[in-house]
Image: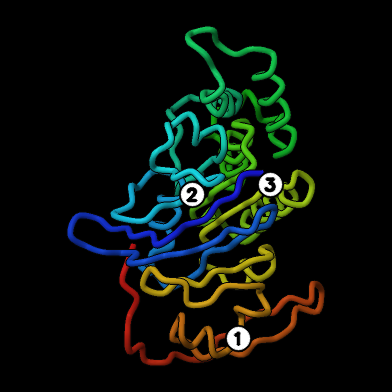
Amino acid sequence: MPTLHTQHLSLGYLEQLIVPDLSLAIPEGQITALVGANGSGKSTILKALARILKPRSGAAYLDGKAIHRLSTKQVAKALAILPQNPEAPEGLTVHELVSYGRFPHQRGLGGLNRDDHRAIHKALALTGMTVFAERPVGSLSGGQRQRAWIAMALAQGTDVLLLDEPTTFLDMAHQLEVLQLLERLNREEGRTIVMVVHDLNHASRYAQHMVAIVRGEVAVAGTPAEVMTPENLRRVFAIEADIVTDPRSGVPLCIPYGLRPRDNPSIGL
């Protein structure tokens, strides 16, 4: 399984420095949640891991190789990225969308082969989207659309999935639908999943590893129990919160009750 980490990674846009010096290891075979205040640099870090954003210095590494030096196809065969709010062309069916995930494996103009069709069928089945295969993506509910995009990412056949706020704009039921799917893919398929998450309780429930980002740097990283403490939430989010134990899963849950003035607001995108 590919290993993913950064060493002294520096990122920014034009003259704005977002991530000054990030060294971060992503545990293999686990779900890692990147959390932090708006503008802390979470999505920027994910872009560097996906080779969308070139570092100013340092690097993100995949199996010991600097990601920004690899070709697009090399990266696409190893990891898949699902950005925020992706849009499908009008009229595109779910099957056609998922087939796009096979692009890194195609040669020339030969079209889809037996392995491609097998991968598409498996991705549709894993996400529960087989019955919607011939439906236009635009006709689906929010949760179904996210499952279709996740199916496309799965069709790439990668061991690593990167997702930027996969539950944004979804209602509670569809949020759980997507998060439970990701949990199952991790548990049953052994996929390494890295996702940017705004809801701390979702991060605690569904991730084995949490990384809290402040001003482009790791403020604290570890298990949910290690990250979800009143002191850490005060430092990372400038909130006062009680931490209680979920009676079903035993994970820590956050109950905010007040704000703490932020002396050093996060800077980033």
Q: Residue at x 34, y 75 (%)?
A: 266
Find numbered disc 2 in the image and state the secondary structure of the residue it sits on.
Answer: strand
In this view, the residue farthest toward the right is 248
Q: Sequence order check: which comes first, mark 3 or mark 2?
A: 2
Q: Residue at x 33, y 47 (%)?
A: 54
Q: Sequence order check: which comes first, mark 1 or mark 2?
A: 2
Is 137 or 255 nearer to us in this picture? 255
Q: In this rendering, would 258 be left or right of 38? A: right
| Label 2: how many Cα within 10 Å (few below 14, some 14–19, many 20+) | many
Give the numbered dot on residue 61.
Answer: 2
**Residue that carries the numbered disc 1 in the rendered image:** 229
Q: CA distance from mark 3 to mark 2?
A: 18 Å
Find numbered disc 1 in the image and state the secondary structure of the residue it sits on.
Answer: loop
Is 260 or 171 nearer to us in this picture? 260
Is 57 or 111 nearer to us in this picture? 57
Q: Sequence order check: which comes first, mark 3 or mark 1?
A: 3
Q: CA distance from mark 3 to mark 1?
A: 28 Å
**Vertical order, 226 against 31 (above or below):** below
Position of residue 96 measured from the top left corner of the image (x, y, whole percent): 55, 23
